[in-house]
Amino acid sequence: MKGLRASLAPLLFLPLLATGCGPKDKSAGANTGPKVVPVTLAEVESRSIERTVDAVGTLKGWDEVTVGAKKIGRVARVLHDIGDRVNPGDLLVEFEKNDAELALDQARKQLQAELAKVGVFAPELPDSPPLEKDIKIYSLPTVIQAQVSVDRMQQNLAREKSLMTKGAGMKQDLQNAENDLRNAQAGLDNAILTARSVIVSALSAWVRVKIMASALNDMEIRAPRPSQVPAGMNSQLSYAVSKKSVSEGQMIREGDAAFELVIENPLRLWLNIPERFVSEVKVDQEVRVFVGSYPGQHFPGKVTRINPVVDSTSRTFQVEAAVPNDSGKLRPGGFAKAEIVTDRNAKAIIVPLDAIVRFAGVTKLFVVEGDGKKARAIEVVTGKEGPGWVELLSPLPELAKVVTTGQSQLADGTPVLVKSSAATTPKPEVSESIKTSGG
């Protein structure tokens, strides 16, 4: 058996020797030029797009207020709790009022007594303060009595002067008549001053009534009434109770907080915008607001205020947007993303998204120029993106077309074979958001 294997071994090497030593294929090495890559091309287009500035921020209530007690007292009733909606002026907390009511009643009685001294009977207390011009001082009994005495003394003096002229009077009687007149005149002046003093006392009593009435009102805590209503608001202004800090029977000191209220329609959105957008962001620009709890839905708003100062640490400036919240879906304190529409018809150079090649931190595309036989690689800077398209911020050669397929096999100067032109670059929809990063 070993002899048979030894005799067959040379025969097995014959085909191998024949293969290895035969004549070389003449076609080998004949195609030594660069490989031609088939590609498709697309036109570079100039279009109008919508530009926005992207930012993130926090939703705030249009107004947030903490209401508390103005007077010390014990809580008798608490009428609302967290989550309730209250209108301006609604009663929130009521204190025990017995002492305040008694003090007010006492002040009213005192005012009525003072007014009675000047001849004014007031079962219903006056809304306006009692003034001298409203009271007929010379019709008061004490003043009339003093005036009658003055008139009588004037008559006596005239009679004594007549007697003295005729030589029938006495000088002493004339002097007595003059003194009696001065005394009567002093009594009249005193009566008038006393009446005016009573009027002042009545005015003081009226002020005290008002103070006591205010103290009685302070035994209630009500929702405040804003002096201004947010511009453009169509619905009735209301507050939401965000915190309750009192309970019935609790003793409250002056200044203690009772409720925290927030106006949740409209809301304020505070955004920090990089300073490079200072020239683009303006008051009254449209804002689209997005929150995580309602994916795919945006809420409209408008820029209302712009802080004129740029923060030197963050290099941002603050922008405030008013966001209507008629539906109540948005919540104060929530995180939100926003797009500020800065230009609805900005001119941009658009290419298909498929033309962009990103590798190792480099963004480029390939163009074909002239006779269309070679591809040229160009580094580019991209801008806004949309479905199937991207904006170029870098210039391209005039009349150049971009390669949309076959880029993975291309290098700068690679020969190409144009198969067919690609479809037209997709157009941005009118309602589409074109974003500019705010970070």
Image (cartoon, grey):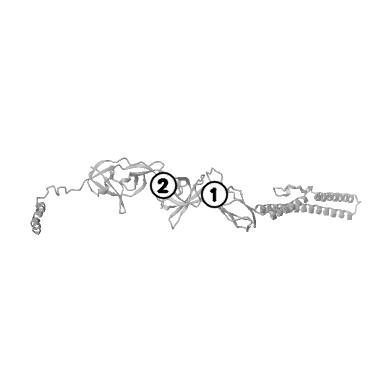
Image coordinates for residue 392, horizontal then vertical, percent: 33, 47
Q: Which mark is residue 52?
A: 2
- In primary-sequence order, the first of circles 2 and 1 is 2
Whether residue 278 appears in this view of the structure is: no
Image coordinates for residue 96, horizontal then vertical, percent: 67, 54
Taking the view exactly as shown, the residue that stands out farthest to the right is 168
Q: Is residue 320 left or right of residue 399?
A: right
Whether residue 2 appears in this view of the structure is: yes
Q: What SS does tag 2 mark?
A: strand
Give the residue pinned by disc 1: 263
Considering depth in this image, is 36 or 22 the residue closer to the camera? Answer: 22
Q: Amino acid at mark 2?
A: Thr
Considering depth in this image, is 141 or 321 the residue closer to the camera? Answer: 321
Count how many numbered circles sit on residues in the image. 2
Depth check, mark 2 against mark 1: the one in front is 1
User: CA–CA distance between discs 2 and 1?
Assistant: 29 Å
Query: Badge 2 local density, few (<14 within 10 Å), some, or many (20+)?
Result: many
Q: Is residue 11 left or right of residue 255?
A: left
Q: What SS does tag 1 mark?
A: strand
Image coordinates for residue 175, horizontal then vertical, percent: 86, 55
Q: Is residue 184 left or right of residue 24?
A: right
Q: Which mark is residue 42?
A: none
Q: Are marks 2 and 1 in contact (CB under 8 Å)?
A: no
Q: Is residue 145 left or right of residue 261?
A: right
Image position of 310 with respect to 341: above or below: below
Image coordinates for residue 404, horizontal then vertical, percent: 29, 44
Q: Residue at x 83, y 49 (%)?
A: 148
Q: Amino acid at mark 1?
A: Ile
Q: Quadrant of residue 100?
A: bottom right
Q: Quadrant of the N terminus?
A: bottom left
Query: Badge 1 local density, few (<14 within 10 Å), some, or many (20+)?
Result: many
